[in-house]
Image (cartoon, rainbow, N blue to C red):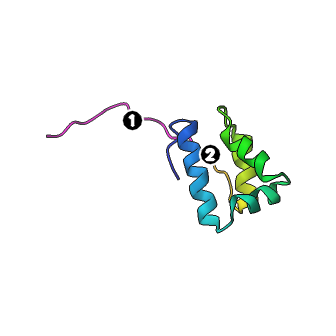
Amino acid sequence: MFEYIDNEHLKKEVKKMIIDSGLTQKEVAEKMGCKPQQYTNIVGKENFAFRDVKRIADAAGFKLLIEFEKKNRYKIFMN
């Protein structure tokens, strides 16, 4: 699990997931039913959508889980 920061961070986490799957990007693309260049275009988009992440996760053998956690209202500073 990781905290979503921005799409660049999300792309890095997707790359880690693929490495953990033991598959190559080409194999993931094939399982998604697309060519490697199409896969590269999907991952390279500025607006990398969660539906794209789900397609990649499914192809790599992972589930996409989304959890919302309430932020802390109070901060404690210690020296």
Q: CA distance from mark 1 to mark 2?
A: 19 Å
Q: Which residue is mark 2?
A: 66
Residue 30 in view in this figure: yes
Q: Quadrant of residue 67?
A: top right
- The residue lying toward the viewer, choosing from 58 and 27, is 27
Q: How many marks?
A: 2
Task: Tell me if mark 2 has few (under 14), some (14-19) or many (20+) residues whose alpha carbon lies within 10 angstroms of its own.
Answer: few
Tell me what residue is drawn at x 56 percent, y 57 percent: 16
Of labels 1 and 2, earlier in sequence is 2
Q: Which residue is mark 1?
A: 72
Say which of marks 1 and 2 sits in front: 2
Tag 2 secondary structure: loop
**Bounds of the magenta segment:** 68-79
Per the picture, the main secondary structure of the magenta-coloured stretch is loop
Q: Quadrant of residue 21?
A: bottom right
Task: Tell me if mark 1 has few (under 14), some (14-19) or many (20+) residues whose alpha carbon lies within 10 angstroms of its own.
Answer: few
The amino acid type of the residue labelled 1 equals: Asn
Question: In the rendering, which numbered label is found on residue 6?
Answer: none
On whether residue 66 falls in the magenta region, the answer is no
